[in-house]
Image (cartoon, coloured by chain):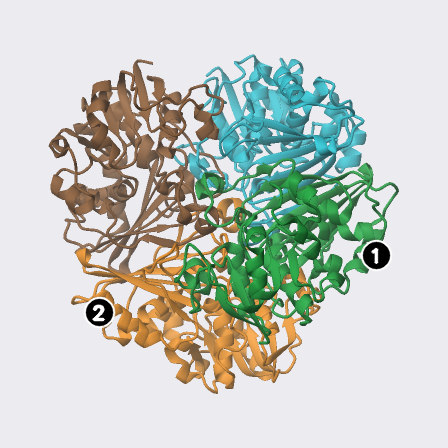
Chain colours: A green, B cyan, C brown, D orange
Amino acid sequence: MTFSASVVGGSGFTGGELLRLLDGHPEFRTVQATSRSKENKTVGHAHPNLRHKDLRFSSPADLESVDVLFAATPHGVSMEQIDAFRDAADTVVDLSADFRLDTEAQYDEWYDGHSRPELLADAEYALPELNRGNLAGADLIASGGCNATATIMGLLPLFEADILSGDEQVVVDVKVGSSEGGAGGGEASSHPERSGVVRPYAPTGHRHEAEIQQFLGVDVSFTVHAVEMTRGASATCHVFPDGPVSKGDLWSAYRESYEDEPFVRMAAGGGGVYRYPEPKAVAGTNFAEVGFEVDPANERLVVFSAIDNMMKGSAGQAVHAANVALGIEETAGLELTGFHPVGAP
Amino acid sequence: MTFSASVVGGSGFTGGELLRLLDGHPEFRTVQATSRSKENKTVGHAHPNLRHKDLRFSSPADLESVDVLFAATPHGVSMEQIDAFRDAADTVVDLSADFRLDTEAQYDEWYDGHSRPELLADAEYALPELNRGNLAGADLIASGGCNATATIMGLLPLFEADILSGDEQVVVDVKVGSSEGGAGGGEASSHPERSGVVRPYAPTGHRHEAEIQQFLGVDVSFTVHAVEMTRGASATCHVFPDGPVSKGDLWSAYRESYEDEPFVRMAAGGGGVYRYPEPKAVAGTNFAEVGFEVDPANERLVVFSAIDNMMKGSAGQAVHAANVALGIEETAGLELTGFHPVGAP
Amino acid sequence: MTFSASVVGGSGFTGGELLRLLDGHPEFRTVQATSRSKENKTVGHAHPNLRHKDLRFSSPADLESVDVLFAATPHGVSMEQIDAFRDAADTVVDLSADFRLDTEAQYDEWYDGHSRPELLADAEYALPELNRGNLAGADLIASGGCNATATIMGLLPLFEADILSGDEQVVVDVKVGSSEGGAGGGEASSHPERSGVVRPYAPTGHRHEAEIQQFLGVDVSFTVHAVEMTRGASATCHVFPDGPVSKGDLWSAYRESYEDEPFVRMAAGGGGVYRYPEPKAVAGTNFAEVGFEVDPANERLVVFSAIDNMMKGSAGQAVHAANVALGIEETAGLELTGFHPVGAP
Amino acid sequence: MTFSASVVGGSGFTGGELLRLLDGHPEFRTVQATSRSKENKTVGHAHPNLRHKDLRFSSPADLESVDVLFAATPHGVSMEQIDAFRDAADTVVDLSADFRLDTEAQYDEWYDGHSRPELLADAEYALPELNRGNLAGADLIASGGCNATATIMGLLPLFEADILSGDEQVVVDVKVGSSEGGAGGGEASSHPERSGVVRPYAPTGHRHEAEIQQFLGVDVSFTVHAVEMTRGASATCHVFPDGPVSKGDLWSAYRESYEDEPFVRMAAGGGGVYRYPEPKAVAGTNFAEVGFEVDPANERLVVFSAIDNMMKGSAGQAVHAANVALGIEETAGLELTGFHPVGAP
């Protein structure tokens, strides 16, 4: 265990996943987990899956010096605390949106502005399948957003294979679990209200459109629905390429992009019950599943993508990025297999 | 209770809903419910919600003469049994797809052909908000399909208000409950496999595209996902009109189409937790909820529609159509209000 | 519609059920629904199942004069507001625990005392199958608690038939839905935390023990678990009678107690999928289902009871009691049938 | 990876869990997984969590020679195939009930007899916390049943500390997930019927009573309910000791029994949302959680126990037993941590 690590915001859902991953990682040792609301309580108090651990939360006011600090704080906190984070750690991996976009103008458009715009150029966006080349040696990493990750993973091969150029109509219809709302939650997140919904919670204007636009160069028509599960994000991308595309063309494109990727699995209409990407098949893991069909009647391609929003969409991606940044084996600590069956994950 | 009624296929889910509705209907009395597999058993044996009733299933081989026969049989049965049905009843309401399409060619394309194509012209499709004028006095009624109904209810006002002409790109992304698979089910419908899925079960080529095309005159890019609920169908329609359309334009269009409709509720971004159409808000009822948003960044309209697939998408629509056909008050037996909260309905 | 009615606390879950029931009741007209938090908003803002209604919440500070006032407020409010309630209405039906117990000493033991103990003798507890004789003409009614109702409905025939005397060991293991926690809820009620639990939320000392003791005269070993559903309460009673009891004895006892009860259904091991009482079979209705088995190896009887906690355990029971108190047909407004299938109700 | 292993019955749920565990086990290499129904298909065809693996199912007619054979077949198969299993492997771990009981008379009473009663004395029952001393070097192991394991884990310390002697009243009320019904399933297991139930599926006479009686020497009043989850078993034990027992006494007893056990976690009323054992906190892991409360009003102890029925109740326990039998580190391959949040696991 070569590197010391800390988790700021350790009592949230994402913080809990980081603690789980670091605990099983051969190269990291967790020296601190902070929580304002649960200071001095064991990590198991917040995360029952970890109640065999004896680590206790400490105050975020006293950050220990570590090799890597993971910030799992709500949007807006990291940009305020970034100096303290960088003082405490050589490498900072931020899981919020605070350093994902390139320019202050984007933060003005999509968020409530940015208090440290001069740092935006320092940060590397992390979606390793897209840009792992930028991550080696990075010291400020902005881990990609969950819904953006699901979408980019689905569409990327179409751009890499020039099936799409960026001018085409792209509709992305996303279904997500309740953990995207974070721990705590208000009335809309209470169990009786949230159970069993098919709720259009972001009909238009979801902020992850900005990440997708920045990295794929395409404006997507993006709508996010809450459905009955606690974790998982599934993106269905309806795209309309200029000319005919066969299923064989798609297999070629996706294999070309992903055949060497350790965290990508293809599922495109094979046999059995689970013929396409499925959030419950990847729950608890860093896998992204990707699949597709051709709809010749409408000159449409339908691309499916499924991730665990807490893992490939958040904590898993952050650890993956840290592995690349620090020169560790990419899959270290992330070779997790989910279980089957599972209900609503 | 003026009219005698029977339900053929009474032990299936749709048959059970018909029995529930007829039982509470002021103008119908149920004189027969048939079931091959549960002959002589009480209806409560199949439908625990009805175990206070003493009606027993009888054989479909001995149909009693009735005023109205509702056929809740699997696709393909009605076209074989239609003569017996019409011999037994003055009015036949078929809930399967067997008489929904106009031509034999359509059945050749979308189904496995049709054994009685000469009768197709006799049948009236029933989606009363679309074509109630055709239903008065009809003696062979084909009740509209669940996913087609959800879609048509969402899109109809756009055509009636000339916001869409039929040439535009229309993507319809549907989420449905497990009852669409019917009672019984195989491995894919078993609880451990079906729970918590976001499963693309009809990525392309869903048969309800034919109904939508026939009645709206538009080719839709249609994809259906199974999600965690037993009943409910929610359609999200992504449409791209030629010119700018404001939210006010949409309110005008939808009010024009639906303000006098007894079974349509609007939900388009008001306050509270449930701001848009929601299957769980209409569970057990004949309501369709419809709502929308404008996405100016993508020149897109997003339309949401939610129904209970067993009710407005099946048994409720069938009773509604029978009411119109027989000159009964349209809402008779259908003034049902759902309950809140409900989990996964 | 002979009687005017109001609902105090109309935006909570129980208040919403009252509004639904009164809306469909032939003898009541709702003239007021109060809510502090949602004043001036439509009832559909809180209860999406009611969004076709145009009633708006008003302030509880201005109570209108009515024939019947239903108080659906949190425990402790009714005892403070009781004078205002009685000034406004001839008949007050309280759905909280504030007037269920007989003596101040019980409130000292099980609650935080009582501010108006002199009124306890005026109130009639309402569980009509137990004591409808007391309810005719009552002007202050305390509607029975959900878990107590499920338990009493299960055990009552054993006492009425002298199978139990009150000295025997009685273990009651209850499973309930999340609506028992009410609208709003805190961290434990948030969807990600509450989903899928089998959580012992009242291992011992649940307050409904007091109601059961008061009415059955037996000390029960009572444990309540939260399970995955939003509504429903299921009680499994394990009892150990002094001598041998056959299944036939049980059928006789339960038929004797319940055969004329309009809201009781028996389910004791018949065929089909649903052989015993089941919350989802009664969801949305005022039915109680009761069933049993004999375990000769352990000289045990196992009794099952299932209700909808919002209905037979709360709003339905309150309306039932009001019907009796006012001399209305007992079943008026309550002849509701649930639907099948339903997921987690 | 010192030992070769095979899984007979690899396409069932338990077989899938074994394949998952063996794949991550440092001392085992899987050389064969058999399936009659999915011969030649990849393991991912049955188990979507494993679709990154390239192992294919082979016929059970051609068993390869291995060090350890795990039999994950339905009850009754192992007793018929046991000679073939033992010919193929030095160590056979049977996950069915075929070799759990000691005598033919028990099989006559609880099952449909036994075809190889002379082998019963050769088999070691495996619940390592109860009897690990017997397992070293065992060559025929009968892995304990899920509901029996949950119950025994909860009650064992009470017997070891002489709080119970075996003469006391013990009521065990169990709640389980749908995977206990196995893959495939019939009408009762179909998603619409099974969703959201609180279904008494074994009111009395559950076969696991025999295992509990055999190993604890106590007759338990045992009732099993199906609730909404796919995996998990939670036992609530209501026990009535002869004299007073304090919570401190219980802490002492449980710590004495379990403080060195690697797979036992205590949760007995601490703070936070998850104060007691909870199936979703152990989903996917080999942990058993145990907790308790004292009910002085009823001279009752309430003991809670939660396991994953597929893991500690089946595949995990089998691998644990194999580790002990073969002299491998007990926790090898089983140091799995679940994830939080999870919905209905």
Marks 2 & 1 on one chain? no
Q: How many marks?
A: 2
Q: Is residue B59 visible?
A: no
Name the quarter where the N terminus of chain C is drawn: top left
Nearer to me, C220 or D217:
C220
Residue D68 is drawn in which quadrant? bottom right
- Judged from this view, the residue extending furthest toward the right is A243
Nearest the viewer among D57 and C117 is C117
* C313 versus C55 height, above or below: below
Residue D15 at what x, y percent from top left?
57, 67
Q: Which mark is residue B98?
A: none
- Residue at x 51% of width, y 49% of height: A182
Amino acid at circle 1: Ser
| Horizontal side, residue D342 vs residue C201: left or right | right
- The chain that hosts pointer 2 is D
Q: Is residue B174 above or below residue D87?
A: above
The chain letter for the residue carrying disc 1 is A
Q: Where's residue B327, x and y in %? A: 56, 12
Which SS class for mark 2? loop
Residue located at (26% from left, 68% from top): D250
Check the picture and name the quadrant holding the C terminus of chain C.
Answer: top left
Q: According to the image, label 1 marks what residue?
A: A252
How crowded is the residue under tag 1: few (<14 C-alpha within 10 Å), some, or many (20+)?
A: some
Q: Residue C313's x, y, as percent?
A: 31, 37
* Disc 1, SS: helix
Q: Is residue D231 left or right of residue D101?
A: right
Q: Which mark is residue D167?
A: 2
